[in-house]
Image (cartoon, rainbow, N blue to C red):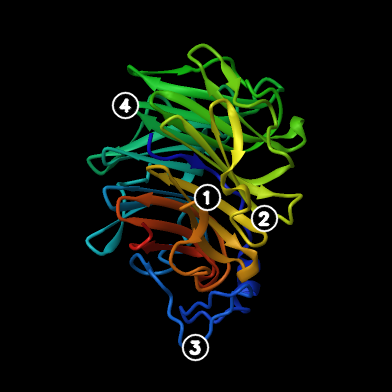
């Protein structure tokens, strides 16, 4: 397993406009708590991947993946005549991926995963009563995997992962007057459910999915556990909790989750610790705080995580720096900033990060660009 997927809630274009007016927007960042730019200090490491604000309208429900140095993004686009967009950056330009005509108007909350050069998406299919549909793009053409609308009822906030040729999708299942997480897998030409439906047993938010060496995991904010985070894994026959239900000390927000070589990583905003960002890992049947302290100096919104080898990289909207984007990593027993903090030109939303060989990428709705999507890259982040 190399990556994970999650869907975030966003902030409106109006909020972007207000916060962007507080910033300089000149690409120069000051490494101080206020996050203001000052003359003479250039942005370190971070540079735009192609044009900033390259969507036609405001971008939300952003997903980012990077494979072999090629970044891919999917998002819902508010621009004229647009809805779902899928793009990749190649030869210095962002290109649309395939002909999305058959699914564009019906795609909500897309989730992206790229495996061996093939992009896969899971989405709420508005043409099928918001049931789950999955598509892949091969030979520059999007094709539905199996049939459209494969869930019994609405499939809210779906997330997708691919491992060893098997496609996994987790979603909030609100069928049959009940609610909870359900996971499907596509294997040997058919969809099947893993374990029982709605196995989380209650209302959930911010679902993440990761698959590590054939073992699927999910994380979510668990309403029945006081809005604390829960993590579960599939043992081959049923879903079991990792470290107990609602194992975070306090209610969590903006959860981000991944698993690497048997170690699970969960990053989130700790709502009762001034909203600071916390990263915990699960190994040897116990959770522990990475570094023993928060990774952010203040409120951390839109948290996203990616792990390269054993190093976690965490991106967040940095309240201490006018809600601009900052990425940190845990190295030599300490949280250190990757390049400059607050490297975006203004406040951001829907932040996603991905660490690929040789670079760290961040995609977000860009307040300086009226909420359009921007992707940044730091090639010196390792």
Query: Which residue is more in the foreground, 129 or 329?
Result: 329
- Please state which of the two labelled residues, at mark 4 or mark 1, is closer to the viewer: 1
* C-alpha gap between disc 2 and disc 4: 38 Å
* C-alpha gap between disc 3 and disc 4: 51 Å
* Image disc number at residue 39: 3
Residue at image position (34%, 50%) is 356
Asked whether residue 129 is in view, the answer is no
* Residue 278 drawn above or below residue 340: above
Looking at the rendered structure, the secondary structure element under dot 4 is: loop
- Are the residues at dot 4 and dot 1 in contact (C-beta closer than 8 Å)? no
Q: Which residue does the numbered mark 4 point to in the structure image?
A: 165
What percent of the width, then of the height, locates residue 265? Answer: 52, 39
Looking at the rendered structure, the secondary structure element under dot 2 is: loop
Looking at the rendered structure, the secondary structure element under dot 3 is: loop
Query: Which residue is more in the foreground, 44 or 366?
Result: 44
Looking at the rendered structure, the secondary structure element under dot 1 is: strand
Mark 1 or mark 2, which has the lower sequence index? 2
Mark 3 or mark 4, which has the lower sequence index? 3
Q: How crowded is mark 4: few (under 14 residues within 10 Å), some or many (20 or more)?
A: few
Looking at the figure, which quarter contains the C terminus?
Answer: bottom left
Residue at image position (47%, 80%) is 28
Asked whether residue 222 is in view, the answer is yes
- Please state which of the two labelled residues, at mark 1 or mark 3, is closer to the viewer: 3
In the visual, does 34 lie left or right of 38? right
What percent of the width, then of the height, locates residue 377? Answer: 37, 62
Residue at image position (63%, 27%) is 243
Q: Which residue does the numbered mark 1 point to in the structure image?
A: 304
* C-alpha gap between disc 3 and disc 2: 29 Å
- Please state which of the two labelled residues, at mark 3 or mark 4, is closer to the viewer: 3
* Image disc number at residue 276: 2
């Amino acid at each position: 397993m190399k990556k994970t997927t999650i869907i975030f809630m966003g902030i409106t274009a109006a909020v972007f406009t207000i916060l962007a007016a507080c910033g300089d927007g000149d690409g120069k960042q000051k490494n101080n708590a206020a996050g203001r730019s000052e003359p003479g200090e250039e942005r370190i490491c971070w540079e735009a991947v192609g044009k900033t604000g390259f969507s036609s309208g405001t971008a939300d429900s952003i997903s980012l993946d990077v494979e072999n140095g090629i970044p891919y993004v999917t998002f819902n686009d508010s621009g004229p005549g647009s809805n779902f967009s899928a793009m990749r950056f190649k030869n210095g330009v962002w290109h649309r991926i395939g002909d999305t005509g058959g699914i564009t108007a019906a795609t909500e909350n897309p989730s992206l995963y790229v495996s061996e050069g093939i992009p896969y998406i899971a989405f709420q299919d508005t043409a099928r009563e918001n049931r789950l549909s999955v598509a892949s793009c091969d030979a520059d053409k999007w094709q539905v995997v199996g049939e459209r609308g494969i869930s019994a009822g609405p499939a809210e906030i779906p997330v997708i992962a691919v491992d060893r040729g098997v496609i996994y999708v987790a979603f909030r299942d609100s069928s049959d007057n009940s609610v909870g997480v359900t996971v499907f897998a596509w294997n040997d030409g058919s969809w099947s459910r893993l374990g029982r439906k709605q196995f989380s047993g209650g209302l959930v938010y911010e679902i993440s999915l990761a698959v590590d060496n054939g073992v699927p995991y999910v994380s979510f904010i668990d309403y029945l556990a006081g809005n604390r985070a829960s993590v579960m894994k599939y043992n081959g026959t049923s879903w079991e909790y990792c470290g107990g239900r609602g194992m975070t000390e306090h209610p969590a927000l903006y959860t981000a989750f991944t698993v690497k070589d048997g170690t699970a990583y969960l990053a989130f905003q700790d709502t009762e610790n001034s909203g600071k960002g916390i990263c915990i890992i699960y190994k040897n049947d116990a959770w522990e705080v990475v570094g023993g302290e928060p990774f952010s100096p203040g409120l951390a919104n839109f948290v996203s995580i990616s792990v390269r080898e054993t190093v976690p990289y965490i991106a967040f909207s940095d309240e201490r720096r006018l809600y601009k984007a900052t990425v940190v990593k845990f190295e030599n027993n300490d949280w250190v900033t990757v390049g400059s903090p607050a490297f975006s030109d203004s406040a951001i939303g829907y932040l996603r990060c991905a660490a690929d060989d040789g670079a760290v990428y961040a995609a977000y709705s860009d307040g300086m660009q009226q909420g359009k999507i921007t992707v940044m890259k730091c090639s010196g982040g390792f």
